């Protein structure tokens, strides 16, 4: 097997370096303008409280009182630990600046990660375009100024995917181990990632990956098994900690999951009045009982589905995916902003504003191209060998996008939740586009040739 990723030239690396510098500069500028007005409330306030309790008391708890700290597992531990590290370095005075600028750097690193992930199944120019889209993505830029998990999670997730692809291509044990650790970090940042490594494991183990020789095939399968075991350390350790240290009546991640399911059970995010579209649960008299337990949730939801079955079927099959990948942030300020921004780079800079307008215009096209990747991938699965399917197509990024869509069709599909998967979305879109560019001229030639 020839390695496509070895075919990019020195000029590609130079262009990639320029794109990375642009991405870093734009993010630093955005953060510099907003650092004095960082919004810390709701989710962000909880994350900061967790971090404070970790640094000051060594307890993972969102309790506000330092007298009676009770361990809980309501939030995933990864991001609070990240904030706690910033607090340990900069103290209460400087931790916020360290945190936000660190997020800007991690977000900029998505650019080379996108390129080195895409080079497996895209020509060099396609991988560079995907990297450029990541560099100027307004959502990926503005999220760096929020005390939220998205920037850290996007970095861990894409790092894990990139490393996993190199593990399959090179068959090096160190890549499988690193990918497992990175997926573990992604899980600890956002527990929605739990099933991704196991899904990839099942796909590889259930297929005849690389038919070059039996010995190589068995070697990869063994390393995949090691990959699965190393990743499992993260969820097992977190579960054991919760079982041993968290009181039975404390708030748990499962409680938050049920609440989120109830928040996502309103078609078009409306209960009755459009005035409460961002927060439909606030006017629902069945809340908070609706999200109190899984049994209550199922009962109330089923009663509502029976009254309007078509409305709920449309919501869960069409409405939720639509909202998840839509441009406007619903539960936030709107447009590309989650929190209020006093001095936005996109309002001050004409170039930044133009890039935002351009990205907004092409966003539906990007989504349609990514969606077209599903039948294209099905075609590839029929006519390509397993190793070609896994490494010569956007199989893994597209699998991740589908996975997130399915998961958030169960939970609340707030558009904010799709921000960390924007690099994978751009890679899928560019893959479909390169295929269409290759197919269409041949089709047109055959049509005109018959005349």
Image: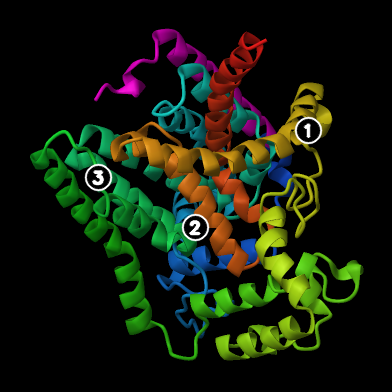
From the image, tell me which residue sits under label 2. Answer: 79
Mark found first going from the N terminus, 2 or 1: 2
Q: Which residues make up the magenta segment?
A: 1-30
Seen as rendered, the residue at the extreme left is 215
What's the CA distance linking mark 1 and mark 3?
Answer: 39 Å
Mark found first going from the N terminus, 1 or 3: 3
Q: Is-magenta flag for residue 172?
A: no
Pinpoint residue 270: horizontal percent, then vertical percent: 82, 70
From the image, tell me which residue sits under label 3. Answer: 176
Mark 3, residues whose alpha carbon is within 10 Å: few (<14), some, or many (≥20)? many
Q: Which mark is residue 135?
A: none
Tell which tag, 2 or 3, sits nearer the viewer. 3
Quadrant occupied by the C terminus: top right
Quarter location, residue 351: top right
Tell me the element at label 2. Answer: helix
User: 405 or 350, which is in the foreground?
Assistant: 405
From the image, tell me which residue sits under label 1. Answer: 361
Quarter location, residue 230: bottom left
Tell me the element at label 3. Answer: helix
Q: Is residue 219 left or right of residue 372?
A: left
| Majority SS type along the magenta span | helix
Q: How is the image coloured?
A: rainbow
| Vertical order, 335 against 195 (above or below) | above
Picture residue at 90% right of the left edge, 67% below the top: 274
Picture residue at 49% right of the left edge, 91% below the top: 249
Seen as rendered, the residue at the extreme front is 451
User: 314 or 111, which is in the foreground?
Assistant: 314
């Amino acid at each position: 097997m020839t390695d496509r990723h070895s075919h990019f030239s020195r000029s590609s690396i130079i262009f990639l370096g320029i794109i990375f510098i642009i991405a870093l500069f734009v993010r630093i500028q955005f953060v510099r303008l907003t650092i004095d007005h960082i919004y810390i409330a709701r989710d962000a306030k909880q994350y900061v409280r967790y971090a404070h309790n970790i640094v000051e008391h060594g307890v993972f708890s969102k309790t506000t009182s330092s007298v009676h700290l009770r361990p809980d597992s309501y939030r995933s531990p990864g991001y609070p630990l990240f904030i706690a590290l910033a607090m340990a370095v900069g103290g209460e005075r400087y931790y916020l600046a360290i945190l936000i600028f660190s997020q800007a750097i991690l977000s900029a690193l998505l650019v080379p990660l996108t390129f080195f992930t895409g080079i497996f199944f895209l020509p060099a120019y396609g991988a560079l375009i995907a990297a450029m889209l990541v560099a100027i993505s307004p959502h990926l830029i503005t999220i760096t100024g929020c005390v939220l998990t998205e920037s850290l999670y996007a970095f861990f997730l894409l790092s894990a995917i990139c490393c996993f692809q190199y593990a399959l291509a090179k068959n090096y044990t160190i890549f499988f181990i690193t990918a497992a650790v990175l997926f573990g970090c992604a899980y600890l940042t956002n527990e929605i990632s739990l099933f991704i490594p196991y899904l990839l494991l099942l796909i590889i183990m259930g297929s005849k990956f690389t038919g070059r020789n039996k010995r190589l095939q068995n070697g990869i399968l063994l390393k995949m098994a090691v990959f699965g075991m190393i990743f499992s350390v993260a969820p097992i350790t977190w579960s054991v900690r919760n079982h041993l240290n968290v009181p039975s009546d404390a708030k748990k991640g499962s409680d938050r999951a049920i609440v989120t399911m109830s928040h996502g059970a309103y078609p078009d995010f409306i209960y009755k009045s459009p005035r409460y579209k961002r927060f439909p649960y606030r006017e629902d008299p069945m809340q908070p009982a609706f999200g109190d337990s899984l049994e209550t949730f199922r009962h109330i939801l089923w009663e509502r589905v029976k009254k309007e079955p078509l409305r709920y079927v449309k919501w869960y099959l069409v409405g939720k995916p639509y909202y998840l990948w839509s441009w406007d942030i619903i539960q936030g300020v709107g447009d590309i902003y989650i929190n209020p921004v006093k001095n936005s780079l996109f309002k001050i800079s004409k170039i930044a504003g133009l890039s935002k307008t351009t990205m907004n215009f092409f966003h539906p096209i990007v989504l349609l191209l990514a969606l077209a990747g599903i039948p294209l991938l099905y075609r590839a699965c029929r006519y390509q060998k397993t190793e070609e399917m896994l490494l010569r197509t956007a199989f893994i990024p597209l699998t991740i996008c589908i996975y997130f869509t399915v998961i958030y069709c169960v939970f609340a599909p707030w558009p904010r939740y799709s921000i960390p998967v924007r690099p994978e979305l751009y890679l899928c879109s560019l893959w479909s586009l390169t295929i269409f560019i290759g197919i269409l001229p041949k089709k047109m030639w055959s049509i005109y040739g018959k005349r």
